[in-house]
Amino acid sequence: MAPPRIPVVKLGWVLSIFLAVTYMLCVGFDLIFPQYAMYRAWISLMPGMTWLTATSFLIGLAEAFACGWFVALVFGPIFNVIAARG
């Protein structure tokens, strides 16, 4: 039986879209409920982002998307190597 493998490209797309949608939901939440705003966390985690301009929103969206690919490109191959050994 072949060891389980994670398809890295599919994982990259899934994580990137998930993080981008999560980012957009969080920005929407901050606009609807400013007293519970989470944007300070986003600003500290994403270089170049401020609150809230169109450019800053797009920077944050791009960084959230890129983080998904980063995790997939690091985690996927590591998982596949360890799973193949096991």
Image (cartoon, helix red, strand yellow):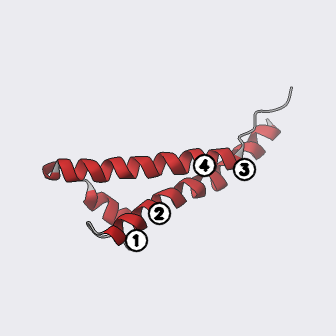
Q: Is residue 4 above or below residue 82?
A: above
Dot 3 corresponds to which residue?
77
Dot 2 corresponds to which residue?
63
Residue at horizontal 32 percent and vertical 65 percent from the top: 43
Element under disc 3? helix
Mark with earlier residue (4, 1): 4
Which image quadrant: the N terminus? top right
Count of numbered badges drawn on the protein: 4
3D distance between C-alphas at marks 2 and 3: 21 Å
Mark with earlier residue (3, 1): 1
Residue at horizontal 40 percent and vertical 63 percent from the top: 60
Q: Is residue 38 above or below residue 6?
A: below
3D distance between C-alphas at marks 4 and 2: 14 Å
3D distance between C-alphas at marks 4 and 1: 22 Å
Residue at the left extreme?
35
How packed is label 2: few (under 14 Cα within 10 Å), some, or many (20 or more)? many
Element under disc 1? loop
Of badges 2 and 1, nearer the viewer stands: 2
Q: Nearer the viewer, residue 36 or 81?
A: 36
Residue 47 is labelled as 1
Amino acid at dot 1:
Pro
Check whether the beta carbons of the residues at disc 3 and disc 1 lie within 8 A of each other: no
Dot 4 corresponds to which residue?
13
Amino acid at dot 4:
Trp
Q: Nearer the viewer, residue 78 or 54?
A: 54
Of badges 3 and 1, nearer the viewer stands: 1
Q: Is residue 48 above or below residue 23?
A: below
3D distance between C-alphas at marks 2 and 1: 9 Å
Residue at the bottom extreme?
48
